[in-house]
């Protein structure tokens, strides 16, 4: 490490923005190039540069003046590159999973028609239910609310929600079986 860098670190630790800018211009390209070796998109590499130098500024008081700053900066960069790669792997795995789910949910025309008919039948059957039971059924099945949320919204107990949903489901199942 040269004396000039040691002086820059000392000034950085004294909140000198000019010293920070000098260090940025000395190291930003190295950080960017390192990130580009591992990350496919330049935007990710640019983000790594920003993160590294924000971390440098935020932790400027902890920077050791006696050690080369490049080690400190590149260690931060490697950490964030690793995290970004890991995040991208998880994201790609998640996207692959969603794509696979979409393929498995692709309906052939006949299945889509059957699904729509069944859905219409369930809708019609729920209109035949007593109004409060029908409302509880719709809140549960159409809006995806939990028993607790339904109970809170309708000012009833969770036990009542459970009882009404059980009766609604029994009615719907019984009438669907009768038709099929």
Image (cartoon, rainbow, N blue to C red):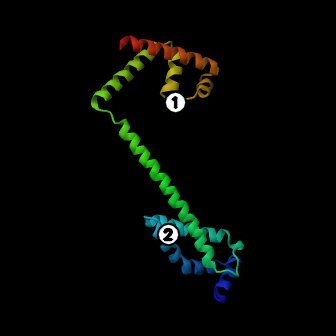
Q: Is residue 33 left or right of residue 59?
A: left
- The residue at the point 48 percent across, 52 percent down is 91
Image quadrant in which you'd find residue 19:
bottom right
Q: Is residue 165 left or right of residue 12?
A: left
**Tag 2 or tag 1, which sits nearer the N-term?**
2
Give the spatial CA distance, label 1 vs label 2. 43 Å
* Residue 144, numbered circle: 1
- Which residue is label 2 attached to? 35
The N terminus: image quadrant: bottom right
Pick whichever, 60 or 65, lies toward us: 65
Element under disc 2:
helix
Inspect this view and state whether residue 156 appears. no
As drawn, 148 above or below 92: above
Residues at discs 1 and 2 in contact (Cβ within 8 Å): no
* Residue 17, numbered circle: none
Q: Is residue 9 left or right of residue 105?
A: right
Image quadrant in which you'd find residue 163:
top right
As drawn, 92 above or below 2: above
- The residue at the point 39 percent across, 23 percent down is 119
As drawn, 133 above or below 153: above
Image quadrant in which you'd find residue 179:
top left
Residue 8's x, y, as percent?
65, 83
């Amino acid at each position: 490490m040269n004396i000039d860098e040691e002086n820059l670190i000392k000034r950085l630790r004294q909140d000198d923005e000019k010293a920070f800018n000098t260090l940025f211009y000395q190291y930003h390209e190295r950080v960017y190039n390192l990130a580009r070796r591992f990350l496919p998109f330049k935007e990710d590499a640019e983000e790594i540069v920003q993160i590294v130098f924000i971390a440098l500024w935020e932790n400027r008081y902890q920077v050791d003046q006696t050690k080369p700053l490049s080690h400190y900066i590149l260690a931060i960069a490697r950490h964030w590159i690793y995290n970004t790669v890991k995040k991208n792997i998880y994201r790609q795995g998640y996207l692959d999973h969603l794509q696979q789910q979409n393929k498995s949910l692709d309906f052939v025309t006949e299945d889509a028609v059957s699904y729509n008919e069944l859905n219409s039948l369930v809708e019609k059957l729920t209109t035949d239910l007593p109004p409060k039971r029908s409302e509880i059924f719709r809140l549960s099945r159409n809006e995806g609310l939990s028993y607790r949320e339904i109970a809170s919204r309708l000012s009833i107990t969770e036990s009542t929600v459970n009882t009404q949903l059980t009766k609604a489901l029994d009615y719907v199942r019984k009438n669907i079986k009768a038709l099929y």
